[in-house]
């Protein structure tokens, strides 16, 4: 069909190109709304013409999640890029979804504040929430859903809905913030978000140590409960044998002294700069996230060694990202994921080019999630098939 119905909304529309592919599926058109009302107008037209829509921010994670069953319109939120309000005295910021995390960090930093999420600078606020990406300091400050106190979303029929506000506690109907965080754009389009902030720490120091794999779990547990109160405890392992690099971040008053106290527990060096890999996801077409109780770390390391996986992430809070270290085949990926699920119980394939790999594993809440999808998007026009169970 022609794109006339979309153009009648007044929104800029262009033909999709190769750079607009969503997990291997190429949309027909790209719509670029500039306001929340224009987002709503596009969704109303798409719902009326049964056009499937996938929202996108910076595009850094468009290859994550399952390929959509269909994708007619890529809804690009790059033009919703304003920081609407920064109430510095209340440690609160309200921003549009297309603002990049780097731009937001720079603006907040000028006021001596930060959003403690540690994500890619070119990722957007909306994309960070939609994929629920957590950085190293989630150990101390929480994941995106924990820092989110208000959200504006546009539902499949073009209805604009708001939840929360400029206060940390607010209860009214659905908690849309928690519901939409990590939903991969399958319930609606995140248009605006309000976060609680933290003051920039006076100082930062990192402890970096190399340990044999057999000593990593005990070291991570000791660091996590240490009186020095690290903000993050991360590990990096190339998966080809050799030592595991363990790093811990200490922030605030007497950071250097407290970091040396951590060094007394594990050995290693105290530095004023993080290791190069800090907060960076493994670079690979196939990326797996595993979540586990920290005592299960030994089993995760065993699985990584057995299946040739490199890994990186938080040993203290039980969240690691893994990627193949050598030659990759669909069979190897499937075997590695099965091994991780056996030892860690939860392993999600965030991205892979291979078909036939079970991405999500067993999900006990799937019937409830399907009912929520049916409630918010009965016509299945929002990123259909991208999420758990083909939601």
Image: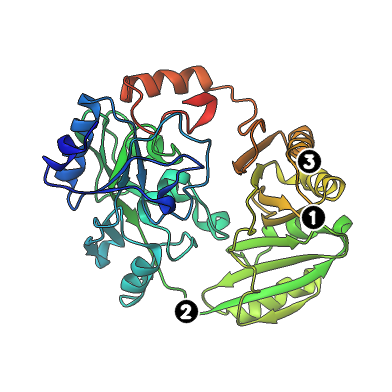
Query: In the image, what residue occupies the spot 47% across and 79% down?
Result: 202
* Mark number displayed over residue 326: 1
- The answer to whether 137 is drawn above or below residue 28 in the figure is below
How many marks on residues? 3
Separation (CA) of disc 3 from disc 1: 10 Å
Q: Which of the 4 image quarters holds residue 383?
A: top left
In depth, the one of 109 and 130 nearer the eye is 130
In depth, the one of 200 and 161 nearer the eye is 161
In depth, the one of 132 and 108 nearer the eye is 132
- The answer to whether 181 is drawn above or below residue 155 in the figure is below
Q: Which residue is mark 2?
A: 202
Query: Which circle's residue, 3 or 1, is located before the other in the chain?
Result: 1
Instruction: Rate crowding at label 3 as few (under 14), some (14 to 19) or many (20 or more) other CA atoms within 10 Å.
Output: some
Query: In the image, what residue occupies the spot 66% across and 81% down?
Result: 271
In depth, the one of 368 and 159 nearer the eye is 159
Mark 1 vs mark 2, foreground winner is 1
Label 3, secondary structure: give it. helix
Q: Say how the picture is coloured.
A: rainbow
Query: Which circle's residue, 1 or 2, is located before the other in the chain?
Result: 2
Position of 162 with respect to 218 (left or right) is: left
Residue 173 placement (x, y as % from top left): 28, 28
Q: Which of the 4 image quarters holds residue 95?
A: bottom left
Q: Which residue is mark 3?
A: 332
Separation (CA) of disc 2 from disc 3: 46 Å
Query: In the image, what residue occupies the spot 64% across and 68% down?
Result: 277
Label 1, secondary structure: give it. loop
Quadrant, the N terminus = top left
Instruction: Rate crowding at label 1 as few (under 14), some (14 to 19) or many (20 or more) other CA atoms within 10 Å.
Output: few
Separation (CA) of disc 1 from disc 2: 42 Å
Query: In the image, what residue occupies the spot 23% across and 63% down?
Result: 87
Residue 167 placement (x, y as % from top left): 27, 49
């Amino acid at each position: 069909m022609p794109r006339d119905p979309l153009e009648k909304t007044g929104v800029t529309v262009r033909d999709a190109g190769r750079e607009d592919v969503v997990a291997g599926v190429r949309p027909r058109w790209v719509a670029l709304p500039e306001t929340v009302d224009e987002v709503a107008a596009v969704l109303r037209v798409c719902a009326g013409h049964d056009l499937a829509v996938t929202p996108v921010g910076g595009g850094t994670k468009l290859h994550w999640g399952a390929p959509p069953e269909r994708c007619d319109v890529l809804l690009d939120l790059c033009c919703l890029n304003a920081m609407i309000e920064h109430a510095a005295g209340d440690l609160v910021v309200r921003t549009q979804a297309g603002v990049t995390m780097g731009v937001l960090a720079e603006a907040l930093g000028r006021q001596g504040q930060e959003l403690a999420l540690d994500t890619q600078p070119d990722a957007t606020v909306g994309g960070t929430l939609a994929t629920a990406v957590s950085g190293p300091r989630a150990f101390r400050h929480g994941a995106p859903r924990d820092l989110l106190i208000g959200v504006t979303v546009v539902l499949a029929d073009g209805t604009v809905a708001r939840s929360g506000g400029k206060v940390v506690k607010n209860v009214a109907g659905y908690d849309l913030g928690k519901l939409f965080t990590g939903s991969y754009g399958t319930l609606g389009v995140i248009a605006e978000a309000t976060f609680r902030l933290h003051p920039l720490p006076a100082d930062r120091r990192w402890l970096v140590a190399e340990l044999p794999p057999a000593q990593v779990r005990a070291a991570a547990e000791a660091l996590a409960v240490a009186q020095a109160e690290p903000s993050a405890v991360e590990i990096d392992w190339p998966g080809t044998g050799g030592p595991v690099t363990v790093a811990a971040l200490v922030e605030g008053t007497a950071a250097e002294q407290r970091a040396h106290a951590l060094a007394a527990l594990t050995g290693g060096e105290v530095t004023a700069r993080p290791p190069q890999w800090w907060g960076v996801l493994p670079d690979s077409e196939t990326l797996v996230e595993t979540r586990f109780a920290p005592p299960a770390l030994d089993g995760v390391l065993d699985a990584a060694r057995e299946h040739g996986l490199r890994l990186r992430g938080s040993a203290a809070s039980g969240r690691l990202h893994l990627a193949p270290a050598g030659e990759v085949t669909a069979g190897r990926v499937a075997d590695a994921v099965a091994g991780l699920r056996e030892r860690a119980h939860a392993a999600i394939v965030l991205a892979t080019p291979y078909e036939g790999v079970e991405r999500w594993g067993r999900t006990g809440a799937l019937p409830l999630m399907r009912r929520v999808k049916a409630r918010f998007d009965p016509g299945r026009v929002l990123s259909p098939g991208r999420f758990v169970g083909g939601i």
